[in-house]
């Protein structure tokens, strides 16, 4: 009992950990709410100090004070500190208690954010500085513009009734976005395919069988259990000869959150679309897309549709041929009356890939043992930028799966803390993402506070017989998220709100997608791709087959991404209240990019986290926009040498370290010398430019 009384909330005190890393081992559930409420109180106190400052508003006593709540005397931003831990774990290591607490805190936090953004005295100071300020550096000017515009875009110019309505809209949207994610996670984890008859495993590779056996053992069941987590779902859909079981898996995956239960997301999606439309119109924009795109490289709706339509024109003829080739093979194998269904596509696509290139993911797995892949990715960063990684077991982690590293720059100075979380588990969202526990900034004493970044993924787990063996696709995912982490780790700006990945949304995917290009480069593969049993390197002949097959179904994959972009834009270019039924609306919205038949009783929208709960609303096109950039940028490396340190240093100096301190096109042109074109992407994909 006395120990309980003496215990202190770790958020309130210096962490006393290496690099002041979060003390996950000391944090308890009850610590969060107390820290959130105290963090809000402190932030309110700070805002009161700013608005009651009798001095004339200046950039230094107003804008910097808003952006930097750390006063250099041991006073840190408590709200940011607890938020980063809580919301990151809500995605990576949650439970029912945390989910309930998130629901409780969400409206409180949204109200607090609104109280700041709608504070009239605070905005008057900001507006005064915006109109009357000393000569500013480009970075200071960017911060001022971002601050002023952020307040305007959050309703600072609205009248009292408008501000009250905005509060209602944002608070409701915050709660619904959280509920959307929680429903999706519950639905995903609720389904399992339990197999006890070994004959039903026909076609599945040994790695998939072993993983399913391990899952069954963890669930205390006999036989094999397959889940909707990608490392389980994808091999099943690709290799299983059991068509009915493939259908069950496919339908389970593609009907998540449309069932008649408490996890149904249909009404939530409809409401979120309307909340965002009303918010945008309240702020003077025709649609939510118009509101969003004002601060994107694309600039406006017209340019987004131009990109998507140009891609359809360029890629659709090839995509139609790709699908026809798969259908032809399926009919050849099964009979001319065979109808290719969506749950058949992956299976027969794989058969055709084997036939054309004699290659598949399982052939490569033995060469992609996770620990070696880690060495390879870290080695790539060392070769390009001179940085090194050292695992430090004294840095606390939130789960035994997580590895923590210290990162050192080429001059030996400390650069960042890097966390890596590789495998799926019960309380973890699907997919892969990069995040931060601490951003980078330069404090008032001139000290460069270094970032703490994390990559979270859902890779194939090790089994009792084998280490974790990845697919080439998983290696690419690792490189993608690692690219984001480099953007965070190389951050070198004065203000935290402009550092690292705090850039325009359609620029943020450039560093990540750029790194994926290395996945099929022989010189890179030579550094880590060794057979986990024999130690033999990945044969040249197999690498050549990888390169030749890299554009297999590339047009189909492109149109799939374009279809998601079209769906996103269809929802968020609505000018009137959205009253349609989600499922038929979805089918019509992306019809132009479809080259396969759509099932009427499946739905993507209700599990489309990116545009409903993940910040990509009216921005999903960003992946294709950034793909144009990444192909264009990598073409520079191909020309100058893919490991050319001078080129890499230029990429770091012009893009990776600059964050959002300047317009992204200015940064890109500084790196390359000219604006990007679609030509490098078409060339990489083997697509001929077509006339409309």
Image: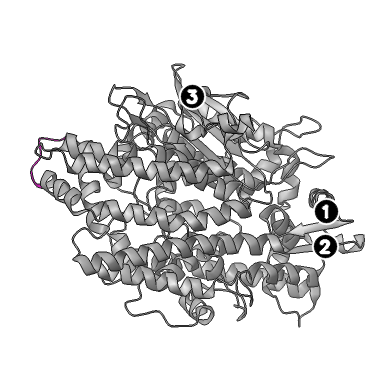
**Mark 1 burial class by Cα count in 10 Å: few <14, some 14-19, many 20+:** some
User: Which residue is tagged 1?
Assistant: 216
Question: How far apart are the alpha carbons under marks 2 and 1?
Answer: 8 Å
Q: Is residue 239 visible?
A: yes
| Quadrant in which the C terminus appears | bottom left
**Mark 2 burial class by Cα count in 10 Å: few <14, some 14-19, many 20+:** some
Label 2: element kind: strand
Question: How far apart are the alpha carbons under marks 3 and 1?
Answer: 40 Å
Q: Is residue 99 above or below residue 83?
A: below
Q: Position of residue 641 (x, y in %)?
A: 46, 32
Stretch in magenta: 131-136
Q: Position of residue 631 (x, y in %)?
A: 44, 48
Q: Nearer the viewer, residue 519 or 177?
A: 177
Q: Nearer the viewer, residue 491 or 333?
A: 491
User: Which residue is tagged 2?
Assistant: 194
At 72% across and 52% down in the image, what residue appears? 360
The outermost residue toward the front is: 2
């Amino acid at each position: 009992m006395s120990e309980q009384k003496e215990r202190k909330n770790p958020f309130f005190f210096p962490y006393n950990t290496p690099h002041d890393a979060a003390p996950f081992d000391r944090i308890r559930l009850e610590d969060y709410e107390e820290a959130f409420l105290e963090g809000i109180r402190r932030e309110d106190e700070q805002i009161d100090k700013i608005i009651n400052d009798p001095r004339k508003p200046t950039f230094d006593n107003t804008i910097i004070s808003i952006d930097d709540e750390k006063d250099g005397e041991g006073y840190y931003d408590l709200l940011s500190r607890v938020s980063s831990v809580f919301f990151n774990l809500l995605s990576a290591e949650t439970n029912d208690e945390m989910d309930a607490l998130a629901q409780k805190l969400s409206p409180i936090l949204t109200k607090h954010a609104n109280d700041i953004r709608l504070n009239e005295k605070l905005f008057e100071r900001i507006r005064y500085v915006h109109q009357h300020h000393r000569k500013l550096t480009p970075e200071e000017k960017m911060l001022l513009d971002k601050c002023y515009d952020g307040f305007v875009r959050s309703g600072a110019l609205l009248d009292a009734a408008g501000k009250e309505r905005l509060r209602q809209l944002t608070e409701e949207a915050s709660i619904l976005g959280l509920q959307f994610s929680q429903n999706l996670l519950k639905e995903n984890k609720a389904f399992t395919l339990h197999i006890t008859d070994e004959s039903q495993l026909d076609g599945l590779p040994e790695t998939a069988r072993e993983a399913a056996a391990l899952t069954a053992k963890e669930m205390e069941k006999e036989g094999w259990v397959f889940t909707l987590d990608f490392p389980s779902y994808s091999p099943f859909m690709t290799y299983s000869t059991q068509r009915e079981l493939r259908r069950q898996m496919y339908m389970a995956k593609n009907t998540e959150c449309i069932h008649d239960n408490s996890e149904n997301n249909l009404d939530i999606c409809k409401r979120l679309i309307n909340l965002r439309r009303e918010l945008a119109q309240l702020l003077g924009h025709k649609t939510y897309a118009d509101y969003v795109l004002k601060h994107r490289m694309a600039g406006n709706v017209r340019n987004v549709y131009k990109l998507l339509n140009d891609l359809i024109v360029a890629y659709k003829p090839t995509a139609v041929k790709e699908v026809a080739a798969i259908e032809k093979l399926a009919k050849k194998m099964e009979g001319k009356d065979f109808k290719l269904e969506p749950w058949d596509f992956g299976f027969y696509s794989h058969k055709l890939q084997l036939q054309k290139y004699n290659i598949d993911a399982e052939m490569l797995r033995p060469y992609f043992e996770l620990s070696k892949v880690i060495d390879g990715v870290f080695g790539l960063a060392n070769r390009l930028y001179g940085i090194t990684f050292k695992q430090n077991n004294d840095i606390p982690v939130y789960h035994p799966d997580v590895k923590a590293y210290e990162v050192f720059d080429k001059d030996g100075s400390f650069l960042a803390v890097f966390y890596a979380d590789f495998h799926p588990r019960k309380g973890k969202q699907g997919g892969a993402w990069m995040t931060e526990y601490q951003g980078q900034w330069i404090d008032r004493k001139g000290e460069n506070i270094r970032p703490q970044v994390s990559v979270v993924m859902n890779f194939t787990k090790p089994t009792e017989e084998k280490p974790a063996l990845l697919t080439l696709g998983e290696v690419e995912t690792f490189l993608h998220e690692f690219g984001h982490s480099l953007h965070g780790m190389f951050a070198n700006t004065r203000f935290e709100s402009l550092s690292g990945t705090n850039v325009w949304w359609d620029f943020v995917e450039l560093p990540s997608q750029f790194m994926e290009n290395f996945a099929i480069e022989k010189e890179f593969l030579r550094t880590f791709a060794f057979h986990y049993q024999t130690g033999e390197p990945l044969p040249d002949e197999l690498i050549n087959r990888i390169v030749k097959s890299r554009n297999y179904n590339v047009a189909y994959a492109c149109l799939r991404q374009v279809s998601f972009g079209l769906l996103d834009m269809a929802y968020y270019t609505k000018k009137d209240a959205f009253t349609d039924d989600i499922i038929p609306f979805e089918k019509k919205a992306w019809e132009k990019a479809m080259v396969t038949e759509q099932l009427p009783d499946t739905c993507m929208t209700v599990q489309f986290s990116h545009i409903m709960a993940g910040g990509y609303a009216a921005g999903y096109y960003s992946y294709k926009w950034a793909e144009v950039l990444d192909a264009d940028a990598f073409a520079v490396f191909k020309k100058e040498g893919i490991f050319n340190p001078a080129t890499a240093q230029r990429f770091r100096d012009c893009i990776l370290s600059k964050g959002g301190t300047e317009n992204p096109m200015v940064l890109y042109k500084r790196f390359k010398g000219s604006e990007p074109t679609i030509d490098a992407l078409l060339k990489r994909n083997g697509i001929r430019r077509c006339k409309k």
